[in-house]
Image (cartoon, rainbow, N blue to C red):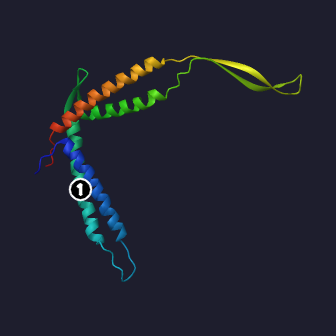
Amino acid sequence: MEKLTVSQGLRRAKKLKGLLAEAQTRAEQSSCWAAGKKPVFSFEAERESRAKHQQEIVRIESAIAVANATNSVEFEGRTIRLAEAIRTLQEFKADLAWLPRLQLKTGVEETSEYDYDEATGRNVRKPKSVTYEAALTEPARIADVQKLRDRFEALNDALETANHRTLLDLS
């Protein structure tokens, strides 16, 4: 039985998914044909190839799931399972997408709006000012984003190191 690390298993699963998609496409293209124009590929052979790739993907991804649930890394003074590290990285990515989109408008904004004036019997433009306050300053947001990036990189480095060292049980 070949020995694969988590990193190798992830790459192998990705490659197998591509091979599975190719076999599936060829099977679809050879599932029926005009009489007398037999397809280049055999439907049964491509279907069998697809099933073989599926089985190997399931085997590898299951072994990766077990490795992620049973192996750990150190992060910020804690020992956490690889599965938790993966989920934490996903949340860091979500926060890194969310924080820059926050509205941080401050100060006074002068606008105008139309309102019906009974005395003149028509809509008139009236000045309006809105004062905005923000819960976070732009410099604070930039600092928060940088801290989050640093945490992401530290955890990602720890996870990648573990993925290169952790062997999968493919028995």
Residue 93 screen position, x and y as percent? 37, 32
For this orientation, the residue located farthest to the left is 1
Q: How many marks?
A: 1
Which residue is label 1 attached to? Answer: 55
Q: Quadrant of residue 110?
A: top right
Q: Name the residue at 23% across, 60% down.
A: 52
Q: Is residue 139 visible?
A: yes
Q: Name the residue at 27% across, 50% down.
A: 14
Q: Is residue 164 above or below residue 50?
A: above
The one of 59 and 139 positioned closer to us in this rendering: 139
How crowded pointer 1 is (Cα within 10 Å; few <14, some 14-19, many 20+) is rated as few
Q: Name the residue at 27% across, 58% down.
A: 19
SS type, badge 1: helix
Q: Is residue 81 visible?
A: no
The one of 66 and 34 positioned closer to us in this rendering: 34
For this orientation, the residue located farthest to the bottom is 36
Q: Quadrant of residue 122?
A: top right
Residue 136 screen position, x and y as percent? 48, 18
Residue 67 screen position, x and y as percent? 20, 39
Residue 142 as seen in the image, left or right of residue 171: right
Which kind of residue does numbered mark 1 sit on? Gln
Residue 64 screen position, x and y as percent? 22, 43
